[in-house]
Image (spheres, rainbow, N blue to C red):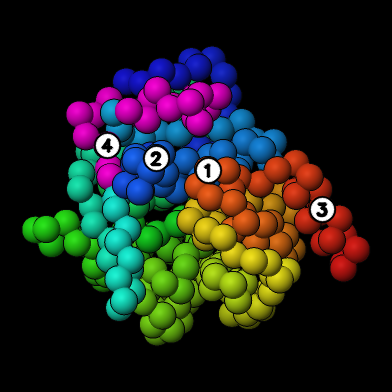
Amino acid sequence: MYRIAPLDPIDYLIIGHVTQDVTPNGLVIGGTASYSALTARVLGMRVGIVTACDSCISSQELDLIPVAGLHSQDTTTFENIPTPNGRIQRIHHRAPGLDLSLVPDHWRNPAIVHLAPVANEVDPGLVRAFPNSLIGLTPQGWMRGWDSDGQVHFTDWPEAGFVLGQADAAVLSIEDVRGDESYIEDFSSHIRTLAVTEGAKGSRVYWNGDVRHFRPPEMNEFDSTGAGDIYAAAFFIRLNLTRDPWEAGRFTTQLAAYSANRRGLDSIPTADEIQLCMTEIIEKS
């Protein structure tokens, strides 16, 4: 097991692989678990990560967040390769899967549980393991497969109906389903609250059969990496606090827009940005 703070309670549990991303400047820490955990922390939550990796345990970026799980010889590692026909993504290594046995007993009753697979590593059955928590999903990793060369491709998610039906909210990108609106229609029929991010266009939120669109402020996008993960953490936190998906959608669309102005984990929201977004939401209410 990794280092944990044995007696410290948490409010926000995230289960998913902390990754390494191959960049022109070398390997950097990434993955939904990293971006969402750091966002939840700056939003005032006591955060814990359950993961499996090697070098992430000594990551300076995650030094203040308790981590539990498996020490793996491999860390899940992705590489994004731009081409004239769009981005090619490759997976070079995958750490072991994650199940309930890796979650410390004293972490099993947080306010929010965020299931955050990036490489089909999270046991879908975990959606039923935390009956007193708000269950939030970022299901992109359940819709990824890869060939013998590690090239990542979209794959159907056979457990979608079951998992979505047991969860409280989900956040995904329109890119996660290759722009296919039929998946969005199907997914929204299974879950009470679904948020779909659309890059510079903002997001839309489905709630009890209704849908609303939220537009971000105009920004010069520098790097959108992690923006969806930042959106997800902020959305689940605001939804848990307010029980209002529309307010959560407005706030998080504003907040995630600021993240695209910076690269990598530097895109995590600042206290000033959080306050500015809260002020804007209050003034427009």
Q: CA distance from mark 4 to mark 2?
A: 12 Å
Residue farthest toward the front in the current orientation of the protein: 24
Is any part of residue 41 visible from this angle? Answer: yes
Alpha-carbon span between mark 3 and mark 4:
37 Å
Secondary structure beneath dot 4 equals loop
For label 1, the residue is 265
Is residue 71 covered in magenta?
yes
Specify start and end residues of the magenta stretch as a single range.
55-77
Residue 88: which disc?
none
Q: Which of the numbered marks, if any, corresponds to residue 75?
A: 4
Place of residue 224 in the rendered image (x, y in percent of width and height, measured from the top left): 52, 60
Using the image, tell me which numbered label, if any, was put on residue 28: 2
Q: Earlier in the sequence, mark 3 or mark 2?
A: 2
- Are the residues at dot 4 and dot 2 in contact (C-beta closer than 8 Å)? no
Label 1: element kind: helix
Secondary element under disc 2, as helix, strand or loop, is: strand
Q: Position of residue 233 (x, y in %)?
A: 57, 50
5 or 64: nearer the eye?
64
Query: Going from the N terminus, do you reach mark 3 or mark 4 first?
Result: 4
Mark 3 secondary-structure assignment: helix
Of the numbered discs 3 and 1, the one sitting upstream in the chain is 1
Residue that appears at 27% across and 42% down: 76
Q: In percent of the image, x 47 and y 68: which residue is there?
A: 173
Front disc: 4 or 2: 2
Q: Is residue 42 above or below residue 55?
A: below
Type of amino acid under label 2: Val
